[in-house]
C-alpha cells in the first residue's frame, strides 16, 4: 500500500448555490497519469437519534431527488454557519424538525457521507431526556412529519426497506454498537 497522493494541478468552480459548491479539479496520480475529479463541497451536518422510553422520533419528508417520501432521523446542516459547533447544530436541528429539546446530548461518532465525490461529513448524536416544544421548520421542510416509533418498529422498517436513508441506518448501527439499543 502506497502513501503517494494525488496532486491537484488546477481547480475551477463549475456550480455554486446556497447549499453546495461543485468544482472540477485536474489531477496527477502517483503514476504520472493525469485526470479529472468532480468534487461536491457541502458543510458537515448532524443526525440525531432522539430516544425516550424505548422509542425513537423519526421525521418523514418528500425527497425531491428520488421522488419519494421516507422516514429518517432528524438531520441537517446550517449552510449560513458551516463552522457551527456540532452539538449546537444537532440540538438546533432536533428542535427545528421535531420541537424536541434534549437535556442530554451524546456524540457517538463522525462519518463521511460519500467521500468518493463529496467532502461532507456528519456528526451522530444521541438525544435523551426530551421535552416537547414547538417546531421551527425551514421553508424547505413545510411537508415534514414527525412520528414516534418503538425501536423494534424502526428495526423492522430498516429490514423491510422502509427506511432507506444511509445516514439513519448508519446512526442506528452506532446506537447498537455503543450499547444504547437493547
Image (tube, rainbow, N blue to C red):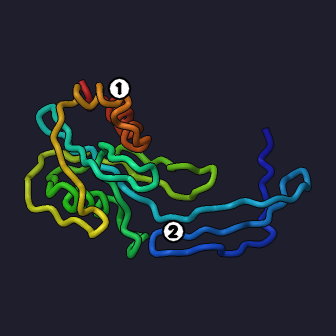
Distance between mark 1 and mark 2 Cα atoms: 32 Å
Using residue 147 as the reference point, say whether residue 85 is left or right of it.
right
> Residue at horizontal 38%, vertical 63%?
77
Which residue is drawn at the image coordinates 77% and 54% (left, top)? 5
Q: Secondary structure at mark 1?
A: loop
Q: Residue lying farthest right?
A: 32
Where residue 102 appears, as percent x and y from the top left, is 16, 53
Task: Identify whether 109 is placed above or below 179.
Answer: below
First along the sequence among labels 1 and 2: 2
Q: Nearer the viewer, residue 169 or 65?
A: 65
- Label drawn at residue 160: 1
The image quadrant that residue 168 belongs to is top left
Tally of numbered discs: 2
Taking the spot 37% from the left edge, 47% from the top edge, the residue there is: 68
In the image, taking residue 110 as reference, residue 25 lies left or right, namely right
Numbered label attached to residue 65: none
Give the camera-side residue of 19 and 103.
19
The quarter in which the C terminus is drawn is top left
User: Mark 2 = which residue?
Assistant: 20
Q: Is residue 176 above or below residue 171?
A: above
Q: In which quarter of the view is residue 165 placed?
A: top left
Q: Position of residue 113 (x, y in %)?
A: 50, 49
Question: Is 59 displayed left or right of 161 in the figure?
Answer: left
Residue 131 position within the rendered picture, expressed as x and y whole percent measured from the top left: 8, 52
Quarter of the image with the N terminus in it:
top right
Horizontally, residue 164 falls left or right of residue 152, namely: right
Categorize mark 2 by other alpha carbons within 10 Å: few (<14), some (14-19), many (20+).
Answer: few
Residue 145 x %, y %: 20, 51
Amino acid at each position: 500500500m502506497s502513501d503517494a497522493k494525488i496532486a491537484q494541478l488546477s481547480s475551477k468552480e463549475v456550480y455554486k448555490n446556497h447549499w453546495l459548491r461543485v468544482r472540477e479539479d485536474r489531477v496527477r496520480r502517483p503514476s504520472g497519469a493525469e485526470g479529472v475529479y468532480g468534487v461536491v463541497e457541502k458543510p458537515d451536518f448532524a443526525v440525531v437519534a432522539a430516544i425516550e422510553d424505548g422509542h425513537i422520533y423519526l421525521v418523514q419528508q418528500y425527497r425531491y431527488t428520488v421522488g419519494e417520501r421516507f422516514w429518517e432521523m432528524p438531520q441537517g446542516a446550517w449552510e449560513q454557519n458551516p463552522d457551527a459547533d456540532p452539538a449546537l447544530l444537532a440540538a438546533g436541528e432536533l428542535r427545528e424538525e421535531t420541537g424536541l429539546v434534549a437535556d442530554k446530548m451524546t456524540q457517538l461518532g463522525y462519518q463521511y457521507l460519500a467521500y468518493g465525490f463529496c467532502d461532507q461529513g456528519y456528526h451522530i448524536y444521541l438525544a435523551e431526556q426530551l421535552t416537547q416544544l414547538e417546531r421551527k421548520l425551514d421553508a424547505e421542510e413545510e411537508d415534514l412529519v414527525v412520528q414516534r416509533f418503538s425501536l423494534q418498529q424502526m428495526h423492522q422498517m430498516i429490514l423491510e426497506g422502509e427506511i432507506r436513508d444511509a445516514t439513519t441506518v448508519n446512526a442506528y448501527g452506532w446506537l447498537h454498537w455503543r450499547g444504547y439499543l437493547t
